[in-house]
Amino acid sequence: MQIETIGKFQIHLIAHELPGKAQWDPFVSIHRFDDEEQDFKCVLEKHHAADHPFPSYEEAIDAARRTGTALLESGKF
């Protein structure tokens, strides 16, 4: 898992290896900084980031990053 901060948000980039397949399934979680509590709160829990698995961990993390960034740019959070 990798965590990247974009403004008041953190995107948690996750890749799970599929059993017996040597492929990686990407997920993203989004956390927003709460000024009142001075801590990050989860606003999107483990969202599936692609329609298909990837042959490497790095490619799955990149897919999770693209999905997380696109979700933030959509303004939903």
Image: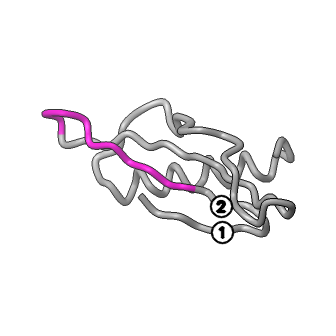
Identify which amino acid the numbered label 2 is placed on.
Gln
From what the image shows, is residue 14 above or below residue 5? Answer: above
Identify which amino acid the numbered label 1 is placed on.
Thr
Helix, strand or loop at mark 2: strand
Mark sitting earlier along the chain (1/2): 1
Labels 1 and 2 touching (C-beta < 8 A):
yes
Nearer the observer, 26 or 51: 26
Q: Is residue 27 left or right of residue 39?
A: left
Residue that numbered label 2 is attached to: 10
Predominant SS of the magenta segment:
strand
Q: Quadrant of the N terminus?
A: bottom left
| Residue lying at 40% horizontally and 55% vertically, measured from the top left | 59
Q: Which residues are magenta?
A: 12-21
Helix, strand or loop at mark 1: strand
Q: Is residue 53 left or right of residue 63?
A: left
| Residue lying at 72% horizontally and 67% vertically, measured from the top left | 6
In the current view of this chain or complex, which residue is farthest to the front? 37
| Residue lying at 44% horizontally and 55% vertically, measured from the top left | 61
From what the image shows, is residue 31 above or below residue 25? Answer: below
Label 2 packing within 10 angstroms: few (<14), some (14-19), many (20+):
many
Q: Is residue 20 on the magenta stretch?
A: yes
| Residue lying at 71% horizontally and 49% vertically, measured from the top left | 70
Residue 11 percent across, percent down from the top left: 61, 57
Q: Report, in whole angstroms, how far the alpha carbon at label 1 lies from the one at label 2.
A: 4 Å
In the current view of this chain or complex, which residue is farthest to the top? 51
Q: Is residue 14 left or right of residue 38?
A: left
Residue that numbered label 1 is attached to: 5
